[in-house]
Image (cartoon, rainbow, N blue to C red):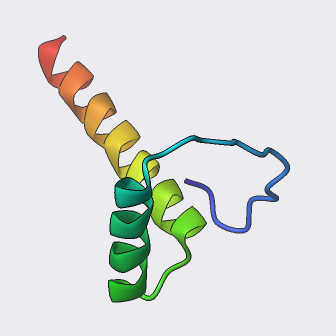
Amino acid sequence: MAPNRTKTETLNVRLSSEMKEALKALAELERRSISNLIEVMIAERAGAGKRTKSRKQ
């Protein structure tokens, strides 16, 4: 993900209270906001998908 990218989009997600608490606990453990934790998780997963696709080709 590009550094210093201006964030202009919003995504609303419905989660169980257990999932929200798990995200909150993990975010606190990593000293991140929940939003930043999810952003990092998506970026890591997207990067893993790109690596997997390039291996298959």
Name, please, the residue furthest toward the front.
17
Q: Residue at coordinates 35% horizontally, 58% vertically from top-left?
A: 18
Extreme residue toward the top, this view: 57
- Please provide percent x and percent y for residue 10: 77, 46
Q: In which quarter of the image is residue 4?
A: bottom right
Q: At x 44% / y 57%, what residue is drawn? A: 17
Which x, y percent locates residue 11?
70, 42
Residue at 60 percent across and 41 percent down: it is 13
Farthest left residue in view: 56
Q: Report x, y in % for residue 15.
A: 48, 45
Residue 11 drawn above or below residue 40: above
Give x and y (percent) for residue 9: 80, 44
Nearest the viewer among 42 and 28 is 28
Q: Taking 39 as reference, is 15 above or below it? A: above
Which quadrant of the figure contains the C terminus?
top left
Q: Quadrant of residue 25?
A: bottom left
**Splitting the image into 4 quarters, where does residue 45 fall?**
top left
Report the front residue among 28 and 9: 28
Residue 48 drawn above or below residue 40: above
In the figure, is residue 31 to the left or right of 9? left
Measuring 44% from the left and 49% from the top, which residue is drawn there? 43
